[in-house]
Image (cartoon, helix red, strand yellow):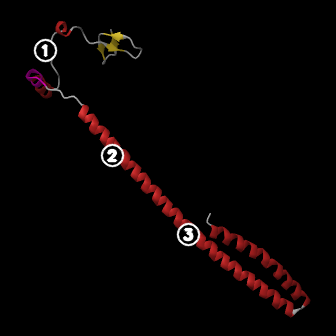
Amino acid sequence: MNVKTMEGIAGADKNMKLLHTPFKVYKDARRRGDQATMERAMGYVAEYKEKVEVYQEKAEDGMKEEAEEMREKAKAEAEKAVQERRDEAEKAQEGTDAEREKTDTVELSEEGKALLGESLETGCVKHSASKEERGQEPVFYTKAGEAVRYVDTEHQVFR
């Protein structure tokens, strides 16, 4: 909380409490019919009331300053967060550039290009090598971790 705000609130509260005393004196003097005491008491009431208004203005000014400080602080934090994100993005970009430099390239042979062309036309890949040339049939694993040679996904049959 801003110092001006605290001072304004405390001052206004104190003067409001002090205002009660001369007002009680005014009421007592009115009951007795003492005009001079009534006027003097009302002078004190007016004086304390003016002080209350001054302190209220001071509290309002302090709250405005505090709100402005909070806006500036939030703006600075937002700018800092944006800068941190930019720095992270730059580091990530540098990391991807470094990864690109490490990447291996693959060249397709003429036979591979022909197979690729066929697979794009027909939608499936034909293997030119037989099971014997490849070594063995493909192996699939179940959720339990068991190796199976044949999987029929339509009927969910494992062999």
Q: CA distance from mark 2 to mark 3?
A: 37 Å
In the rendered image, the quadrant that contains the N terminus is bottom right
**Residue receiving disc 3:** 65
Q: Nearer the viewer, mark 2 or mark 3?
A: 2
Question: Residue, x 13% and y 14% (percent of image)?
Answer: 128
Element under label 3?
helix
Say whether residue 10 is left or right of residue 83: right
Q: Nearer the viewer, mark 3 or mark 1?
A: 3
Task: Specify the amino acid type for callout 2.
Answer: Glu
Residue extent of the magenta highlight: 108-113
Instruction: Return the residue found at the far top.
Output: 132
Q: CA distance from mark 2 to mark 1?
A: 46 Å
Asked where in the image residue 31 lies, by quadrant, the reply is bottom right
In the rendered image, the quadrant that contains the C terminus is top left
**Residue receiving disc 2:** 90
**Residue receiving disc 1:** 128
Question: Residue, x 77% and y 83% (percent of image)?
Answer: 45
Sequence-wise, the earlier of marks 2 and 3 is 3
